[in-house]
């Protein structure tokens, strides 16, 4: 595209900070840079018409990790590392709430419940056995014990008698959250350029030269906040992971309220607008879902529908309204990557499926690093 003199002069010259990605992390980074550098020129480039990746595709869980997820994390991390991960999630949610306000994001503390399918009886008993120890480990983070037994009040089928409930887990409206963040960025005189894909960038002493699918430009500092799409630039323990989701049509008198997990967090569902939103199934095909291509597969979608019918809504007729997918950034380690990758380029990635919980905090840490 041949841009005019006016376009280059107004939009693409004398840029102090360029942020790649307009998700939670990128928008939060831009807002914190604006606080620190009130007179700077800040530009966000976004490959999608709307924010891509996972920030507008997720289930809206303000969560810290179910008990089985935390036990799994303890197999790969030290106890102190897991405590720090949970602490970051709590701090991130608090920062998001303070930035936008609970009403604006429809924050609701309805608790989070982990269900255990009958076939996962060994995991069920292990989690019950370890619950007191996990509560003791995390009590300093929350000021109380987060996990407790909860009877099957929602009448799910083919599950064990009790859930393990986290009283601090909550839910938000993802669309409202992202709309409010975008509005706040606009009010802070930060420019977002949509449908712009960064192909490559090159360091050049005092600036970074950036080549995109539509134009080339320069920036003094570059911040990469594309999470699951960042592996082509960052040689770290980072890879994309697709998450598939569906939502039902409205269900009259829906009695299910809260956020729910099962199968070590590989499946999750919640109520929203008298509907059930259900996602997961990546564990059915780890290799196939290790992709940065959006789309749905028959094997995952069929399993999601089966779980709706057999476990979640066994006595309730339902119809599927829509389906979609999002792209996360994961690795063997859960700790986010916030680092300087060259003299003038930085990144904040690998949110591990916890973007709502930690995206705001990682954006702040990225801005602080710059």
Image: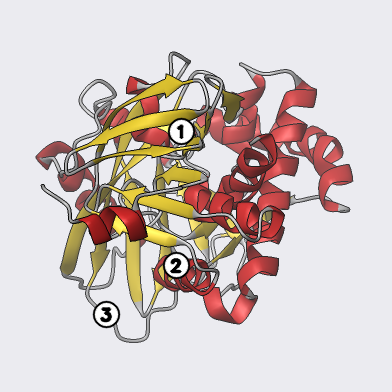
Q: Residue furthest bottom?
A: 253
* Residue at the spot 51% in from the left edge and 45% down from the top edge: 17
Residue 59: in sight, yes or no?
Answer: yes
Q: Cα distance, mark 3 to mark 1?
A: 30 Å
- Between marks 2 and 1 in the image, the one whose residue lies nearer the viewer: 2
Q: Nearer the viewer, residue 91 or 248?
A: 91
Q: Which label number is shown at residue 250?
A: 3
Disc 1 target residue: 120
80 left or right of 1 in image: right
Name the residue tied to disc 2. Answer: 182
Mark 3 or mark 1: whose residue is earlier in sequence:
1
Q: Vertically, is 95 above or below 54?
A: below
Q: Nearer the viewer, mark 3 or mark 1?
A: 3
Q: Quadrant of residue 276?
A: bottom left
Crowd class of label 1 (few under 14; some 14 to 19; many from 20; radius 10 Å)? some
Q: Nearer the viewer, residue 224 or 134?
A: 224
Q: Residues within 10 Å of mark 2 (few under 14, many from 20)?
A: many
Can you tell which of label 2 and label 3 is closer to the viewer? 2
| Circle nearer the N terminus (2, 3) | 2
Looking at the rendered structure, the secondary structure element under dot 2 is helix
């Amino acid at each position: 595209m041949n841009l005019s003199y006016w376009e280059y002069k107004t939009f693409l010259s004398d840029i102090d900070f360029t942020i790649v990605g307009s998700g939670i992390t990128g928008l939060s980074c831009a807002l914190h840079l604006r606080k620190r550098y009130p007179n700077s020129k800040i530009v966000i480039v976004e490959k999608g018409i709307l924010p891509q990746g996972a920030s507008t595709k997720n289930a809206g869980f303000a969560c810290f990790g179910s008990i089985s997820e935390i036990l799994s994390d303890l197999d790969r991390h030290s106890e102190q590392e897991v405590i720090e991960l949970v602490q970051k999630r709590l701090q991130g949610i608090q920062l998001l709430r303070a930035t936008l306000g609970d009403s604006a994001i429809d924050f609701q503390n309805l608790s989070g419940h982990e269900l255990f399918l009958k076939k996962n009886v060994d995991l069920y008993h292990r989690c019950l056995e370890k619950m007191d120890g996990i509560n003791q480990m995390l009590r300093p983070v929350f000021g109380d014990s987060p996990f407790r037994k909860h009877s099957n009040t929602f009448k799910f089928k083919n599950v064990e008698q009790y859930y393990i409930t986290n009283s601090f887990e909550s839910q938000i409206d993802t669309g409202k959250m992202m709309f409010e963040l975008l509005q706040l960025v606009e009010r802070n005189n930060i420019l977002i350029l949509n449908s712009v894909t960064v192909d490559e960038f090159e360091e050049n002493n005092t600036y970074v030269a950036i080549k995109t699918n539509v134009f080339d430009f320069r920036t003094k500092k570059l911040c990469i906040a594309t999470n699951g799409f960042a592996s082509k630039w960052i040689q770290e323990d980072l890879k994309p992971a697709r998450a598939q989701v569906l939502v039902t049509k409205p269900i009259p008198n829906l009695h299910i309220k809260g956020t729910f997990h099962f199968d070590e967090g590989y499946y999750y569902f919640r109520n929203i607008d008298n509907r059930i939103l259900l996602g997961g199934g990546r564990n059915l095909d780890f290799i196939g879902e290790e992709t940065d291509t959006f789309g749905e597969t028959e094997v995952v979608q069929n399993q999601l529908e089966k779980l709706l019918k057999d476990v979640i809504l066994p006595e309730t007729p339902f119809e599927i309204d829509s389906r979609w997918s999002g792209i996360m950034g994961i690795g063997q380690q859960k700790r986010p990557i916030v680092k300087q990758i060259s003299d003038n380029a930085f990144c904040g990635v690998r949110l591990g499926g916890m973007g709502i919980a930690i995206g705001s905090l990682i954006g702040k840490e990225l801005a602080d690093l710059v």
